[in-house]
Image (spheres, grey):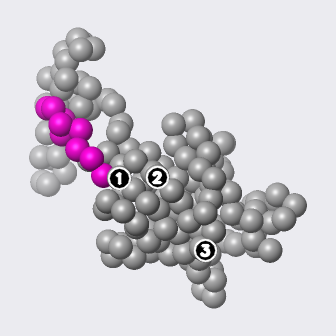
C-alpha cells in the first residue's frame, strides 16, 4: 500500500507540470544542485588500483565521521567515464567534514573536505555545498573539474 501512495504522489507531480520551461516548479524537479567528488586511486605508474584489483570494488566503503553515516557500493563498475572511481556525494556541514575511505579490511585512508553550505532560497529552497578544499591522508589535493563534478587523484606507493 505504501508503494501505491508513493506512485500516486509521483504521478501527480509528474503530470501536473506544464511545459513552460520558466516554471519554477519544473526547475525544482529537473535541475540538480548537488555534485560528486570522484577519487581515482592509482600507483606511481598511473595504473588504477581498483581496475587491477589491488583493491576490490565491492569491499570499499566510506564512513562519514562528521555525520555518522556509512556508504557502500561507492565504486561504479561498467559505467564508462567513471568506472573504477570511488564516488562521494558532496554534502555535510560548513567547514571540515571527515570521511574514512575503507579500501580494505586492513587499510583505511582519511579524506577531509572543507565545504561551504548555503541555502538556495526561492520556491525550491535547498542546500548547496561548495567544495573549497580536499585533503587526503594529510596531503592537500588538486581538485579537477570533472564534467560538473570534481575529481582528485590519489597516488598510493
Furthest toward the top, the residue is 20
Indicate yes or no whether the magenta region holds residue 4: no
Among numbered discs 2 and 1, the one appearing first in the sequence:
1
Residue named by callout 1: 116
Residue 137 is labelled as 3
Task: Verify CB contact (< 8 Å) between mark 2 and mark 1.
Answer: yes
**Left or right, residue 114 beside residue 156:** left
* The C terminus: image quadrant: bottom right
* Residue count near mark 2 (Cα–Cα under 10 Å), binned few <14, some 14–19, many ≥20: few
93 shown above or below 117:
below
Of labels 1 and 3, earlier in sequence is: 1
User: Which residue is at a point 82% across and 58% down the rendered structure image?
Assistant: 46
- Could you say which disc has been placed on residue 132 in the image? 2
Query: On the rendered structure, is 140 left or right of 16?
Result: right
User: How far apart are the two marked residues, 2 and 1, measured between alpha carbons?
Assistant: 7 Å
Q: Which residues are magenta?
A: 117-125
Which type of secondary structure does the marked residue at label 3 adopt? loop
Left or right position of 50 against 18? right
Kind of element beneath mark 1: strand
Is residue 125 placed above or below 72 in the rendered structure? above
Q: Is residue 14 above or below residue 109?
A: above
- Closer mark to the observer between disc 3 and disc 2: 2
> Where is residue 43, by image quadrant?
bottom right
Q: Nearer the viewer, residue 77 or 81?
A: 81
x 70%, y 72%: residue: 55
Q: Earlier in the sequence, mark 3 or mark 2?
A: 2
Q: Quadrant of residue 50?
A: bottom right
Amino acid at each position: 500500500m505504501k508503494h501505491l501512495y508513493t506512485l500516486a504522489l509521483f504521478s501527480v507531480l509528474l503530470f501536473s507540470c506544464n511545459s513552460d520551461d520558466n516554471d519554477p516548479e519544473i526547475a525544482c524537479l529537473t535541475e540538480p544542485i548537488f555534485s560528486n567528488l570522484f577519487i581515482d586511486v592509482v600507483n606511481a605508474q598511473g595504473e588504477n588500483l581498483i581496475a587491477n584489483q589491488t583493491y576490490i570494488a565491492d569491499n570499499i566503503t566510506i564512513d562519514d565521521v562528521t555525520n555518522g553515516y556509512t556508504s557502500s557500493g561507492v565504486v561504479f563498475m561498467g559505467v564508462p567515464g567513471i568506472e573504477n572511481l570511488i564516488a562521494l556525494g558532496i554534502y555535510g556541514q560548513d567547514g571540515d567534514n571527515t570521511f574514512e575511505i575503507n579500501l580494505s579490511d586492513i587499510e583505511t585512508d582519511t579524506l577531509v573536505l572543507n565545504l561551504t553550505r548555503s541555502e538556495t532560497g526561492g520556491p525550491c529552497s535547498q542546500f548547496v555545498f561548495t567544495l573549497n578544499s580536499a585533503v587526503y591522508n594529510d596531503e592537500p589535493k588538486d581538485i579537477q573539474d570533472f564534467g560538473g563534478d570534481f575529481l582528485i587523484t590519489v597516488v598510493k606507493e
